[in-house]
């Protein structure tokens, strides 16, 4: 694809900037709840270090909105990384500036320096030129292993590549692109798409694209309620995007006679989104006006699982319910297990679905776990990802 892989470039003695996506989920105590993204970039980090490169690692974490907020420090990630690599990884106080420059100056071959959150600088997301140049000046070789950030044209994913001679893709980036391409170019049928998560509006593009590709589309999670409302069901206090109802209806129309477009048939409901709230299970026709639907019900799990088990290709993005809360997690875990049991080539993307697959203990039974939620969706939509394009030097 006209992109150099990291093992095709000269690394020994070079200052090598590796853009990783270590934007991992953290709980209220700032503990990492899923380290998949770190683990999957280890081969690239180890390779560059082993080849005698001076490794400069850079990532974003959360949305600090351009301010230096301790809550978004990469220090828990540095700690986990040290543990995984079984060697101390130092965290720099910033990602640019005098001190960072001095620390890099003193690095030996194979050493690793982890830069502080790129998004502490508003210029990162603005892809600002002087910031891009400042990042580029830190290194001689650029490696992008951050597939999860490839759909963003930021300074560290696009801007800085203009000022570096040697740019390349890490092993994870390469694997992501090749796996997604494989599934998309010529998917074996039946092809089942599973979409969940909070909002229809986030996933319009992918729904439209999947309508032309899949055999069956299974929709669960919060986004299902806009569709159910569009079909005329009372959905109580469930998540509904009023301004998407018309479009949802249009999508359902487009799907008619073309593909199977399945919405939930029953639901786990609660008086409110709270662990202590009263709960129940109801079918579409009996959702009480003042309750909220927080997971797909057992009948839906059964029907969705049947479809999943007969698939030969599966793409899944987004949880089937508020799976972070145990009483509303069963639907998502059941789907994770069904995907694992199916003999289809499966791709699971998006932080929540990946976490569900890990928590269900079935990650090793998935064809490809994509570290990029938004990026894998945009890839599936057929969009050009700027972070990948930037790696194509001289066409
Ligand atoms: P997304 O980032 O769009 O994939 O959305 C993930 C979020 O959707 C998770 O935090 C879930 O808790 C949330 N979610 C899933 N199902 C529901 C639901 N029925 N009601 C409200 N939120 C939901």
Image (cartoon, rainbow, N blue to C red):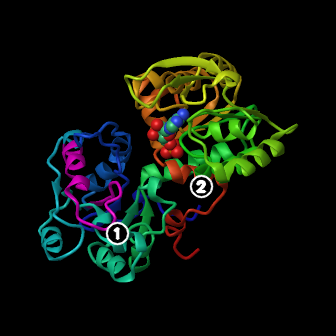
Q: Residue at x 38, y 76 (%)?
A: 164
Task: Judge: label 1 CB < 8 Å from ligand 1.
Answer: no
From the viewer's perspective, is the residue at label 1 or at label 2 nearer?
Answer: 2
In the image as oriented, which residue stretches furthest toward the right?
Answer: 257
- Where is residue 180 drawn, in percent x and y? 59, 47
Q: Is residue 320 left or right of residue 66?
A: right
Spatial separation of the CA atoms under disc 1 and disc 2:
27 Å
Q: Secondary structure at mark 1?
A: strand
Q: Is residue 288 left or right of residue 149?
A: right
Q: Secondary structure at mark 2?
A: helix
Q: Which residue is under mark 2? A: 378
- Where is residue 237 drawn, in percent x and y? 56, 35
Residue 319 seen in the current view:
no
- Numbered tag placed on residue 13 in the rendering: none
- Where is residue 283 drawn, in percent x and y? 66, 20
Q: Nearer the viewer, residue 294 or 1?
A: 294
Q: Quadrant of the N terminus?
A: bottom right
Q: Residue at x 72, y 46 (%)?
A: 248
- Where is residue 293 drawn, in percent x and y? 55, 29
Q: Residue at x 15, y 62 (%)?
A: 108
- Please provide the residue range marked out in magenta: 56-82
User: Residue 264: which quarter of the image?
Assistant: top right
Q: Are marks 1 and 2 in contact (CB under 8 Å)?
A: no
Q: Which residue is under mark 1? A: 141
Q: Could you tell which of marks 1 and 2 lies nearer the N-terminus?
A: 1
Residue 260 seen in the current view:
yes
On whether residue 322 falls in the magenta region, the answer is no
Q: Residue at x 16, y 64 (%)?
A: 93
In the image as oriented, which residue stretches furthest toward the bottom?
Answer: 130
Q: Nearer the viewer, residue 309 or 364?
A: 309
């Amino acid at each position: 694809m006209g992109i150099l892989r990291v093992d095709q470039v000269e690394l020994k003695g070079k200052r090598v900037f590796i853009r990783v996506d270590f934007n991992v989920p953290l709980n209220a105590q700032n503990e990492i709840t899923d380290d998949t993204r770190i683990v999957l970039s280890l081969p690239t980090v180890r390779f560059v270090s082993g080849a005698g490169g001076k490794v400069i690692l850079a990532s974003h974490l959360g949305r600090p909105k351009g301010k230096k907020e301790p809550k978004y420090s990469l220090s828990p990630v540095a700690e986990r990384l040290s543990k995984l690599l079984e060697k101390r990884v130092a965290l720099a106080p910033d990602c640019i500036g005098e001190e960072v420059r001095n620390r890099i100056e003193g690095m030996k071959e194979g050493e690793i320096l982890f830069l502080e959150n790129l998004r502490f600088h508003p210029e990162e997301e603005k892809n600002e030129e002087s910031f891009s140049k400042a990042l580029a000046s830190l290194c001689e070789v650029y490696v992008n292993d951050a597939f999860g950030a490839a759909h963003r044209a930021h300074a560290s994913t696009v801007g800085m590549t203009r000022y570096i001679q040697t740019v390349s893709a890490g092993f994870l980036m390469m694997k992501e692109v090749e796996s997604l391409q494989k599934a998309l170019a010529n998917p074996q049928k039946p092809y089942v798409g599973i979409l969940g998560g909070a909002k229809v509006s986030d996933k319009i593009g992918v729904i439209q694209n999947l309508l032309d590709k899949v055999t069956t589309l299974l929709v669960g999670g919060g986004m299902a309620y806009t569709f159910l409302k569009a079909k005329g069901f009372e959905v109580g206090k469930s998540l509904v995007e009023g301004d998407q109802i018309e479009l949802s209806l249009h999508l359902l129309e487009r799907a008619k006679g073309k593909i199977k477009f399945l919405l939930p048939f029953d639901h786990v409901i609660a008086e409110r989104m709270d662990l202590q709230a009263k709960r129940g299970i109801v079918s579409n026709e009996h959702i009480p006006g003042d309750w909220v639907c927080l997971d797909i019900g057992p009948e839906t799990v059964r029907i969705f699982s049947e479809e999943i088990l007969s698939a030969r290709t599966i793409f899944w993005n987004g949880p089937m319910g508020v799976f972070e809360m145990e009483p509303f997690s069963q639907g998502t875990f059941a789907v994770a297990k069904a995907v694992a049991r199916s003999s289809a080539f499966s791709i699971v993307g998006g932080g929540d679905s990946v976490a569900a697959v890990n928590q269900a203990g079935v990650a090793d039974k998935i064809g490809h776990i994509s570290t990029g939620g938004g990026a894998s969706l945009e890839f599936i939509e057929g969009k050009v990802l700027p972070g990948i394009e930037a790696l194509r030097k001289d066409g």
